[in-house]
Image (cartoon, rainbow, N blue to C red):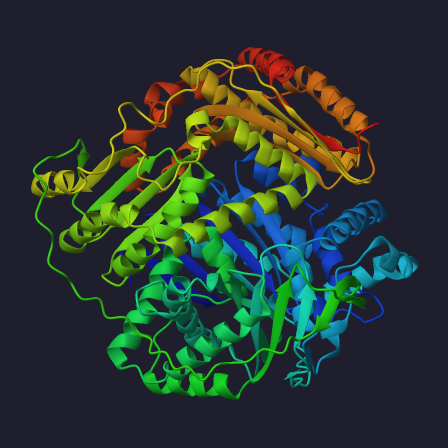
Amino acid sequence: MNESRQIKDLRLANGLRVQLIADSHMREAAALLQVACGSDDEPAEQPGLAHLLEHVLFAASAGFSGAERLMSWVPAQGGMLNATTRSDRTAFFFSLPPLQLESGLVRLVDMLANPLFTHQAISEEIAAIDAEYQLLAGDREHLLEVALRQLFHGAPCLSRFQVGSAQSFAAVAPALPQALRDFHQRHYHAGAMTLWLQAPLALSSLERLVRQHGTLLPPAQPLVNPVPARIYAHRSMALQLNGPPVLCLCFALNDWQDTDADWLNVFNQLLCDEAAGGLMACLRQQDLVDDVRLRTFWRSQHALLFAVQFTLSRDDAALCGEVLTRFSCWLAQLADPNARQLEHCVQLAADAFWQQPPLDQLRRRALGPGLPQALSVAAWQAAIRRLHCASQAHLWVSGSLAGRRRQHQGFTLKLAAWPSVSQSPVRQDFCCWPQVTVAPLPPLAANSRSIGWRYARATPRLWLLTRAGEREAALLETALRPLAARLSHQQGQWRHERWQGYWLMQLSAEPAPLEHAVASLWPQLCALSAAQLAQGQRAIRWAAWRDNTAIAIRRLMAALIRELTPADAAQSASGVRHLRWQALLLSDSPDLQQRLARRLSPLPEASRPLIAPASARVWQGVTLSYPPGDAALLLYCPLPEWQPHVRLMWRLLALFCQPLFFQRLRVEKKIGYVVSCRFQQWAGEEGIIFALQSPHAPLAVLQQQLQDFLHSLPAAVSALSEEAIAALGGAVWAQLEQQAQTPEWQACEAFFSPDIALRYPENQRWLKQLSRAEIARGIAALQQSAQHGWCGQAGQLAD
């Protein structure tokens, strides 16, 4: 157990199960409440009822409504929230600054315990769900999941419509209010609920919160345990869908228990392992597969359906046979690890779990697979035998098929017969349980390069930052996968991410494996194979395809990101050797710094700070033609000047506008299903984004509504109380502190980014002393910026 982390399980008197995670290294708090009911529990004659209840609960409760309800209040504090309805469970979750956790929990409990089922809220959420249904009808991932369910039978809910739509709800409209109340009363009680809290607070403080507020949930009722259905494969099929070709190998696991998630975690770790000799390394080397994921697409109390989903390198049925052959061979070689190998893989899976943000960790705990626990060799071998015996089906997803239209679960699929593919008898030996051998280090280079250094008594950590375009980023990810996997097997970490519009790589390990990894970096970048170059090309091609086929507002957002990306980063070149880098090392060893400076000497060095304020520009905007129906508008209001107080004001205005924007356009005007306002930071540019998408309002209406909202802001500022102004300033400061999750990240930000200057004490004092007049001047600057900012619009254009 990590010394900074403590975990405690509780069961309250009303039956509520609770897990508390106190983690002093966190900079934010997260909460998730799961209810043990989902779409499969709703009456067959009322499809979508569970989904509708999830929506309506956010509308208002006995204690909170309007701007004070959870839906509006959390974003105003700089937090995030969402909910999801699955087949057998529903989850509500949020993240907030730690000091706001109790206020968020109070609202969550009241929302679930004391909802107001008003006719207006029900009507509004039916419209929202219908818009969601229209989007899902063209959503590739959702249609793929619908198709996967059709491969199996044994439970009627596998083929039942469950999303809900205006048409399905209209058929039962008079009965809906009472049906929602009955469903809520039957299932939303403490005995069917589990609450997770994770925060940088003492366990005693977290326990006080749940004992004070968790007891307000309705007491437990007897749980109904339905007779478990046995699920069996029905058929294999092919599905016509545009986009990357996919092969899914699907398994039905009956008699499923939550403890089975431990071996499934290890299986997923081995499946996705990119180390030399593993399944993915071999499939990539042979240019058969570009990606793999383990996908759970249905579960009940006693059964689980999951797929091993391969993204194929070519849209060719013959590849299905090639991949199936190698997967079967690999699976047969998984059965005989020793205890040390198995323990190593469990630890790798646990490390990957703890690297995720707190809210993602809670989602995994609730929705699975959660934190992996110890696993015996006997249990692992039994699991592999179970996989071999499981009922199986296959799905090939291709853009070149001529499928027949069929209706399933309320959606149209283009289905065809499973292709006739042959599995070759070729046997391939895999290194299923990688053992990394340490090769001798090459001689140190005579030259060295500049590398920042900060003293830290912890595992050495190296950051490398570069300005990479989309193509270069795809090639970097492809080239460095084997090195990242190798380092993970040496108890190290190699992570990369887009950070403020740049490509940031983080390596963390003990000195010896860290130096080996750095020594391999430049040779790896210089030796991209033909297969790796092809994989990088496909990655950028499919990324562009996803942008071009996304919903209108996402297409506009992608266009804005392209506009914000510096010109030299957007240009593609052959390979990645031309990229220039900045480097920072955190360690307690000056000798390690000197050695790494020599190891990194071949890497081109950035001659100036990469992250710096962008120069003034003239914004062009974009107009996209979009099919009849939806219209979308995206307005980016750039920062007027790069001064600390202006940058803080822009963050504050985004927090101020967000709940007002949502309340006015989503709740009052019912403008559409995308109503968002947030602060945007990318490649030295900062601004505020206003986003709208509507299935019924034309573009001209969206433009007018946005202008009216901006004109209404001075009056809203004049109504602000001193307490509200202080709360806004506090929320901005809490957001800034959350950006640097750990002391290591604070050092990284201080070296690479100008954001560290915002957290100087004088800026905190300025936020505390902020006046209404200063906010009013900020609103005037925002209105001016809106007139000259970037505007993207999408809709049916006039001829």
> Is residue 332 depicted above or below 566 in this figure?
below
Q: Please state the horizontal and vertical placement of residue 553, each as a whole percent of the image.
A: 66, 37
Q: Which residue occupies the foreground of this view, 215 or 302? A: 302
- Is any atom of residue 200 visible in this view? no
Would residue 406 be found to the left or right of residue 88 on screen? right
Q: Which residue occupies the foreground of this view, 94 or 727? A: 94
The image quarter in which residue 440 lies = bottom left
The image quarter in which residue 67 lies = top right
Q: Please state the horizontal and vertical placement of residue 612, each as a whole percent of the image.
A: 37, 22
Would residue 273 be found to the left or right of residue 640 on screen? left
Image quadrant holding the N terminus, namely bottom left
Q: Please state the horizontal and vertical placement of residue 614, each as a whole percent of the image.
A: 43, 19
Would residue 708 be found to the left or right of residue 250 on screen? right
Q: Residue at x 27, y 60 (%)?
A: 486
Q: Please state the horizontal and vertical placement of residue 721, each as a whole percent of the image.
A: 60, 21
Image quadrant holding the C terminus, namely top right
- Is any atom of residue 781 visible in this view? yes
Q: How many marks?
A: 0
